[in-house]
Amino acid sequence: MSLISDNLQAVLADIQLVALDSGRSPEQVRLLAVSKTFGADAILDAASCGQMAFGENYLQEALEKIDFIQQHSPDLKLEWHFIGPIQSNKTKPIAENFSWVHSVDREKIAQRLSEQRPADLTALNICLQVNISGEVSKSGVLPQDALSLALKIAQLPRLKLRGLMAVPEATEDEQQQRLAFRHLKQLKDEICKHGIVLDTLSMGMSSDLHAAIAEGSTMVRIGTAIFGRRNYAK
Ligand SMILES: *Cc1c(COP(=O)(O)O)cnc(C)c1O
């Protein structure tokens, strides 16, 4: 048993406990393992424990790992989620290599992803990133602009709009954490009233997954609690 395997078991147990505590079924909460800054070896370790969905923030780093794993384990079918900031000149490799993109916050990016999604792949799953705490420096569409963006993206042929994603302002106060997630859930419900079917709330990271699950998260994005602390200096 490796450390990653132990950590994965602990996170899955945690998800199950909090879901049941919140009157939800644990199957309603998917675990996305966020592997940024960690190598293909760590991903393969997690995959050997049955974890198949991985989130990456940095395109070049992600492409190298995807390529390496395809070369070395061609039969392993991992599901790649792009969760980082997107430059408009980098949309093509994202459209070609990922199953999900959680960080779409403007129409131009969505249009390009739709145009560049290869015809032999299924539609690209999309979450709109919402700047739910209204922080000046944060990426994400402002809550008041999310509906109009969702209506536009829902029209794009090669995308499948699945839901909303947010990274709320960091706080250790669980009530504050819950409030931000509740706002994201309310925004999703509001958008659904306009005839758009959304089934995903991508919310919750290592330090706030309890609050996120209690407020209705359907996908938690967990890095540190699975792989350990990130070393950006390497
Ligand atoms: C890094 C990152 C995560 C994982 O964060 P941890 O605190 O390490 O669990 C989740 N979501 C996004 C968008 C990230 O950039």
Image: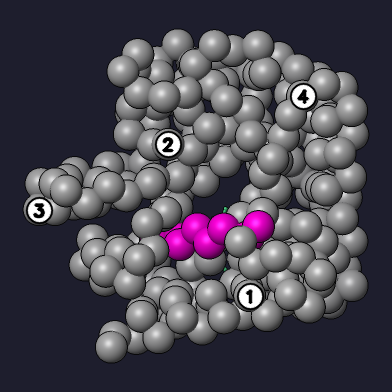
Residue 32: x and y in percent read 50, 58
State the CA–CA distance, disc 4 to disc 2: 20 Å
| Upstream in sequence: badge 4 or badge 2 | 2
| Dot 1 crowding, Cα within 10 Å, few <14, some 14–19, many 20+ | some
Per the image, the residue denoted by label 2 is: 99
Q: Quadrant of the N terminus?
A: bottom left
Colouring style: one colour
Q: Amino acid at mark 4?
A: Ile
Residue under the point 57% across and 41% down: 102
Label 1 close to label 2 by CB (< 8 Å): no
Going from N to C along the chain, the mark reached first, 4 or 3, is 3
25 with respect to 65 (left or right): right
Q: Residue at x 89, y 61 (%)?
A: 179
First in residue order: circle 1 vs circle 2: 1
Label 2–label 3 contact, CB within 8 A: no
Q: Is 22 situated left or right of 138 in this image?
A: right
Give amino acid for label 3: His
**Does residue 172 lie above or below 170 as drawn?**
below
Q: Which element is circle 4 on?
A: loop
Mark 1 → mark 4, Cα distance in angstroms: 29 Å
Q: Nearer the viewer, residue 64 or 22?
A: 22
Ligand 1 quadrant in view: bottom right
Determine the secondary structure under disc 3.
helix
Q: Is mark 2 within 8 Å of ligand 1?
A: no
Q: Amino acid at mark 1?
A: Gln
Which mark's residue is nearer the viewer, 1 or 3? 1
| Residue 42 in view (yes/no) | no
Magenta region: 28-36
Number of callouts in the render?
4
Q: Earlier in the sequence, mark 1 or mark 3?
A: 1
Quadrant housing residue 208: bottom right
